[in-house]
Structure formats: structure tokens, C-alpha cells
Image (spheres, coloured by chain):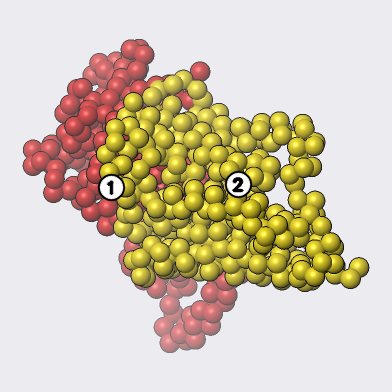
Chain colours: A yellow, B red
């Protein structure tokens, strides 16, 4: 029983990285911009966060630094694809390569450095409830922030006027433009907010999850976060669910190995990725499902006045 | 059988190639600069040209881990021979085609001996070695040789055994955890030695193993360590590179060991000791033999006896009798009287793998493909 509680706790901690980044990318894509640079933004955010935590010793300064770094990376991307209309796919890939190189180059000074441990904070009263306490209520605050963010984003996109405008920009920028909305600036705002969330996800990884700096610390989680938005058919709650599913399968395979279950470890290591592909394939079988939820102008440049 | 060894760097291959090219060109510049110096001093006193020595690294040297340990060895070479040698390093060389180009460049630049410090450099180095018969090549942890390419390796299972002695005493749950990289003989030897060491002081000990299929991915290593701890393990060892396992143990109030280099600074409470390799002794001997012109192709496997491996910095919490036991075993290894793999050794299905009172030879060690009794589960690749 206790082991299951710990498994759930580890799943939440592990899924939070993907949840933050996935929600950020969702916001991007709802405004019609596909940013394949997630991995690069996360890496730069991870480095900025680690450096800030190393210098200041304060996690919140680290998350702010990660957010700022992610937002700056996203701004560069945004200006390129929104104003100069460069290809979003190619620019995003370039951003990933650039972020990987930049974080490695600057990060040489931090190679092998570690931070003191950031444990979870028990919620008074709830942390000691049997089973549920260790499973749910002894997490790092970022776990709860990710969940709150999911609700906030859901409310913003589907209940607020600004959210409606943002979705409008993603569906039909021409119409939004005709109504007098500043499509480019709204897109830039969404891109930068998404970048900031990716940056926070990176900082969470290098400051809380594994408090040390090594090159390429994200190890592909940016790509998983990108897949998650499609996996979730662009719904915030499903992004969170997908993130926990992925985190859960990752932790489960370690758990099964430790218990001596006779499955090839290579197969188990594949499991999280395999399950993502299977779900993606299942979703894609239903074209209307994708069409209803996918922002109609995703990935397409917008030329005002054309 | 041998899976890809040491830190494959697959991601951003293009970027890495650029980085390597940049580094390679940097090292070229370094070569160019000192060239006039010997020429100028040649008139005053005929000083021999420094012998050029090159090292190929899979990663940056950093502050801890595999490449860091090799770089310490390189520094020992510099300290020993001073201006008689000139060392060059190329960091972050991916295993494969890039490695071949880097090694060929280094050979063409006049390096007399080249050390390649990762398993995956074996084939590329073998190819280049055939093209440069006058250059000596040395490959770490491999198994293929040629007339001018030797191999060298360390007995990491010796410090792993000593770590096991400490772990067997310190565990309260009688459950040890091991974070493995790839199920190759080298890593299996370490798991088995760790378990045998623990059993020598505590017969009830069992070891749980989790494979992460990577040499370095800190969040993954940390997750694996966490799941071992959740499953009841309270002393951990890893055959991966980063300090993540130690840090995870620290967070949970459990114990772990440093690996490859001294990691005592990374987890004050969790660190029980570090299993390390000192490559400097071998590097100095190999470089000296090149200076003297006596280099011979050889397969070198050194351990505690030769000063290549050690178990260092046992923590204050380790009881004195256990520290004494570790010292006793270490003394036996130094004297050559103690062999970790001495029969009878049973695998975890009960089959005898080494007969009573037999000491394992090199061939036996090269082919380890089983868990000893006390390790739980099955090796993933073995059916």
C-alpha cells in the first residue's frame, strides 16, 4: 500500500515537468503558432534556473530566471516567425539546436555542480493522512502550481473574453484582424508566455528534480511535451492527464524492474514513448476529433492585409 | 553482446559535429603556437622536441565522473614529464564516424600516442591505427587490439566489492539497490562484486537492480534510485556517471556511494565512500615507454594492486570494525592474495558458475552474464 502511495507521489513529481511545458505549448498552439523549440527553451530555462539557484539559493528566483530565459528565447522565435514569416518548423528546430548549444556552452562553468536538496513541503493536516498524505500532499509546491495552472488556463481559454480572442487568432487570424485585434502582438504574447512556462519546466528539472547541471539535462522531454498537446487534443486537463500518464509509466517501469518482474528493461524503457505513439495513433484515427480541437491556423503564417 | 559503451551522444549530432570541428581546430591552433619556441632554443641547447600525447574524451572533464577521472590522469602525465610532453585533449567526441575523424586528425598532427577513453572508440581507433603504423594507440575498456593499438582497463569490481562490505553492514532493510547502465559483463561484474561484498558481512542481503539504459541522464538516474528506495532498498550503488543517485539517497535519508571519482562533496550525509579509478599511473607508464621507445602492444588490466582502483573516503558513520575489514580486503588485493571472484560462486538460479576454491581468470571475467545468488530478477538481455 505504502509503495503504491510512493509510486503516485513519484508520478506527480515526474509529470510536473511535462505538465508545465505542455500547458505552455498548448497556449502557443491555441494562438496558431507551433514552436518546435520547446527543448531548446527548456534547456536554456534549466541553465538559467540552475545558475540563479546556485547564486541566490532561492528556488523562486530560479523559477523567475528560468521563465525570463524561456520568454527571451521565445521572443526571438516569435519575432522571426510572426513578423518575418520564417517557416515555423525550421525556426523551431533551429531554436532547439541553438538552445542546446547555448546551454552547453554557458553551462561549462556549472558542469558537475550540484545544489542542496529541495524536498517536498508537507501540507499541514493533510500530509499525515494515511496513504493520501504520502501520495499527494508532500510534493514540491510546483506540482500544485501546475495543477492550478491547468484550471487557470482552462478558465482563460474557454471562459474569458481574452481567451476567446486568443483562440480566434489561432482559428482565423484574418477574421480577428478584420475585427481590429492586433494578431501579431497577441501571438507574440502567447509565444512568450509559452516560452516562460517551458523555461519554468526546465528550471524545475535542474533545480528540483535533479539538482545538478549536466548538458542536455532535459533529455528529450521538450519533444514529449510537444507530442502531449496533440495527445491531449489541445485540452488543458488532458495535457495534465497525459503528463501524469507518461510520468507514471516511466516510474512504473523502474518499479517493476526493482521488483524483479521479468520484462526486458529495454522494452520497459520504451514503454512511455510507445504508449504516447499508440494514443497518438488512436486519436488520429478520428479525423473530426482532430479537426474540431486543432487550431485551424496552426503553423500557418499570417500576413495582414493580404 | 557488448552494447554501445560509454555515453553515446545522439542528440543534436549536427551540433556536436560542429563543436568537435571547432575544438579540433582549436587544438590545431594550440599546436601551431609553440612550434617556434623549440626552434629558437635549439641554437642554445639542443632540446628534444616534446612528445605529443593526445586524449579523446566522450564528455567534458567537469568536476566529477568518468572523463574527470581520465583528465586527472592526464594532469599527472603533465606534472611528471613537464616540458618533455605536450598533451592535447578533444572533448565531447561522439562515438562513431566523428571519433574516427578526430583520432585521424590527432595522428596526423604528430601525436606519438593517443588515448581513447570510451568503449565506442574501439572500431574507429582500429581503423586509424592501421593507417598510422608509427603512432601508438591506446584504447580504454575495449577488447580488440592490433600491432600498434593496445588496450587498458581497470578492475572496478574491486572497489565495488569494498563498497559492498560497507553496504552490507549499513543496510537496515537487508536490501541494496543498484542503478545499472547497460547489462554488459563489466557492469554485471560490479553488481555481483557489490553483492558478494555485502554477503561477506551479512548473508541475508539481497540486491535489487534497475537498468536505466544510459550512462548519464540525471533525472532518470534519480527516478531509478527513488523507485529502488521506495521498494525498500536503503543503500545504493550506481554504474552511471552523475551524482544524481547520491543526491536522491541524501534526499531520502538513505546511503549511497560515489562512482568513478571522489563524490564525497556532493552528499554530506548519504556518501559512504567512493569507488574510484586513478588512470594517471597507467598513463605515466605508457607515455614513458613511448619517450623511451620501449612501447609494446599489450592488454593491461589493473586494479587495487597496481593503484588503478581504490575505495576512498569511508564515512564517519561506518563502524570501525567494518573499516578494518575493508582495509584487510584492500591489503589482500594489494598483495594479490585476495580475489573477489573466488569459488564457489552460484548464480541466482542456484547453478554453480565457479567451482569451490577456484580463482576466476580473465576469460571468466570477460564473459560474466549472470547475477550471483542474492541479486533479484533476471538480466534483461539474457533469455
Q: Which residue is mark 1?
A: A124
Mark 1 belongs to chain? A
Image coordinates for residue A28, horizontal then vertical, percent: 67, 57
The image quadrant that residue A194 belongs to is bottom right
Of B109 and A178, nearer the camera is A178
- Above or below residue A198? Residue A256 is above
Q: Which residue is mark 2?
A: A236
Q: Which numbered disc, 1 or 2, marks the residue that appears first in the sequence? A: 1
Q: Nearer the viewer, residue A25 or B120?
A: A25
Question: Mark 1 and 2 residues: CB-CB less than 8 Å, in contact?
Answer: no
User: Does residue A289 appear anywhere in the picture?
Assistant: yes
Q: Which quarter of the picture shows residue A52?
A: bottom left
Name the residue: 75% across, 46% down.
A294
In the rendered view, does B235 fall on the left or right side of A223? left
Question: Along the line of sight, which residue is nearer the eye, A72 or B40?
Answer: A72
Is B45 left, or right, of A276 in this rendering? left
* Disc 1 element: loop
Dot 1 surroundings within 10 Å: few (below 14), some, or many (20 or more)? few
The residue depicted at 50 percent of the width and 64 percent of the height is: A66
On whether disc 1 and disc 2 are found on a single subunit, the reply is yes
- Residue at horizontal 27%, vertical 52%? B267
Give residue B315's position: percent from left, percent from top: 17, 48
In the image, residue A250 lies at what x, y percent? 49, 36
**Is B359 left, or right, of A71 in this rendering?**
left
Q: CA distance from mark 1 to mark 2?
A: 29 Å
What quarter of the picture does the C terminus of chain A occupy? bottom right
Mark 2, residues whose alpha carbon is within 10 Å: few (<14), some, or many (≥20)? many
Amino acid at each position: 500500500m505504502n509503495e503504491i502511495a510512493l509510486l503516485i507521489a513519484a508520478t506527480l513529481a515526474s509529470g510536473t515537468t511535462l505538465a508545465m511545458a505542455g500547458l505552455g505549448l498548448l497556449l502557443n498552439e491555441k494562438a496558431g503558432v507551433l514552436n518546435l523549440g520547446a527543448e531548446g527553451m527548456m534547456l536554456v530555462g534549466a541553465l538559467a534556473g540552475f545558475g540563479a539557484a546556485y547564486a541566490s539559493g532561492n528556488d523562486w528566483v530560479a523559477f523567475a530566471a528560468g521563465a525570463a530565459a524561456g520568454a527571451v528565447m521565445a521572443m526571438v522565435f516569435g519575432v522571426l516567425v510572426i513578423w518575418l514569416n520564417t517557416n515555423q518548423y525550421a525556426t523551431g528546430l533551429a531554436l532547439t539546436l541553438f538552445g542546446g548549444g547555448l546551454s552547453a556552452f554557458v553551462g561549462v562553468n556549472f558542469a558537475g555542480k550540484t545544489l542542496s536538496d529541495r524536498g517536498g513541503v508537507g501540507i499541514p493536516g493533510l500530509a499525515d493522512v494515511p496513504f493520501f498524505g504520502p501520495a499527494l500532499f508532500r510534493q514540491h509546491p510546483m506540482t500544485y502550481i501546475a495543477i492550478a495552472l491547468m484550471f487557470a488556463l482552462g478558465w482563460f481559454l474557454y471562459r474569458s473574453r481574452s481567451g476567446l480572442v486568443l483562440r480566434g487568432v489561432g482559428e482565423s487570424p484574418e477574421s480577428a484582424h478584420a475585427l481590429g485585434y492586433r494578431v501579431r502582438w497577441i501571438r507574440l504574447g502567447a509565444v512568450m508566455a509559452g516560452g516562460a512556462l517551458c523555461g519554468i519546466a526546465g528550471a524545475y528539472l535542474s533545480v528540483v528534480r535533479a539538482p545538478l547541471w549536466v548538458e542536455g539535462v532535459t533529455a528529450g522531454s521538450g519533444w514529449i511535451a510537444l507530442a502531449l498537446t496533440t495527445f491531449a487534443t489541445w485540452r488543458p486537463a488532458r495535457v495534465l492527464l497525459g503528463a501524469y500518464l507518461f510520468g507514471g509509466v516511466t516510474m512504473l517501469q523502474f518499479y517493476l524492474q526493482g521488483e524483479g518482474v521479468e520484462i526486458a528493461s529495454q522494452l520497459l524503457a520504451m514503454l512511455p514513448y510507445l504508449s504516447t505513439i499508440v494514443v497518438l495513433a488512436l486519436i488520429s484515427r478520428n479525423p473530426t476529433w482532430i479537426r474540431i480541437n486543432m487550431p485551424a491556423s496552426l503553423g500557418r503564417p499570417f500576413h495582414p492585409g493580404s | 553482446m557488448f552494447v554501445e559503451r560509454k555515453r553515446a551522444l545522439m542528440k543534436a549530432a549536427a551540433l556536436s559535429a560542429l563543436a568537435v570541428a571547432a575544438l579540433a581546430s582549436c587544438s590545431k591552433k594550440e599546436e601551431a603556437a609553440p612550434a617556434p619556441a623549440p626552434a629558437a632554443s635549439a641554437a642554445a641547447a639542443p632540446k628534444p622536441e616534446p612528445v605529443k600525447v593526445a586524449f579523446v574524451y566522450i564528455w567534458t572533464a567537469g568536476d566529477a565522473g568518468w572523463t574527470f577521472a581520465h583528465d586527472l590522469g592526464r594532469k599527472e602525465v603533465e606534472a611528471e614529464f613537464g616540458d618533455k610532453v605536450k598533451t592535447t585533449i578533444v572533448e565531447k567526441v561522439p562515438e562513431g564516424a566523428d571519433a574516427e575523424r578526430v583520432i585521424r586528425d590527432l595522428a596526423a598532427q604528430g601525436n606519438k600516442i593517443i588515448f581513447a577513453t570510451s568503449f565506442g572508440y574501439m572500431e574507429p581507433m582500429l581503423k586509424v591505427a592501421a593507417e598510422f603504423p608509427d603512432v601508438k594507440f591506446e584504447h580504454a575498456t575495449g577488447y580488440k587490439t592490433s600491432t600498434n593499438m593496445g588496450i587498458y582497463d581497470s578492475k572496478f569490481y574491486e572497489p565495488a566489492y569494498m563498497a559492498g562490505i560497507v553496504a552490507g553492514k549499513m543496510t537496515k532493510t537487508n536490501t541494496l539497490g543498484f542503478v545499472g547502465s547497460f547489462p554488459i559483463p563489466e557492469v554485471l561484474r560490479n553488481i555481483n562484486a557489490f553483492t558478494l561484498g555485502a554477503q561477506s558481512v551479512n548473508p541475508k542481503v539481497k540486491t535489487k537492480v534497475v537498468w536505466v539504459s544510459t550512462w548519464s541522464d540525471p533525472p532518470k538516474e534519480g527516478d531509478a534510485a527513488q523507485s529502488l528506495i521506495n521498494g525498500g532498498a536503503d543503500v545504493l550503488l550506481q554504474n552511471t556517471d552523475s551524482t544524481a543517485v547520491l543526491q536522491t539517497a541524501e534526499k531520502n535519508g538513505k546511503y549511497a556511494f560515489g562512482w568513478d571519482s571522489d563524490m564525497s562533496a556532493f552528499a554530506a550525509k548519504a556518501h559512504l565512500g567512493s569507488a574510484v579509478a586513478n588512470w594517471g599511473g597507467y598513463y605515466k607508464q605508457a607515455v614513458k615507454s613511448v619517450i623511451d621507445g620501449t612501447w609494446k602492444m599489450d592488454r593491461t588490466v589493473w586494479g587495487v594492486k597496481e593503484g588503478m582502483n581504490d575505495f576512498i573516503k569511508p564515512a564517519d558513520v561506518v563502524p570501525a570494525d567494518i573499516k578494518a575489514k575493508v582495509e584487510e580486503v584492500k591489503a589482500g588485493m594489494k598483495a594479490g592474495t585476495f580475489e573477489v571472484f573466488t569459488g564457489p560462486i552460484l548464480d541466482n538460479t542456484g547453478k554453480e558458475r565457479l567451482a569451490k576454491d577456484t580463482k576466476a581468470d580473465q576469460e571468466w571475467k570477460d564473459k560474466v552474464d549472470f547475477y550471483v545468488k542474492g541479486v533479484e530478477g533476471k538480466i534483461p538481455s539474457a533469455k
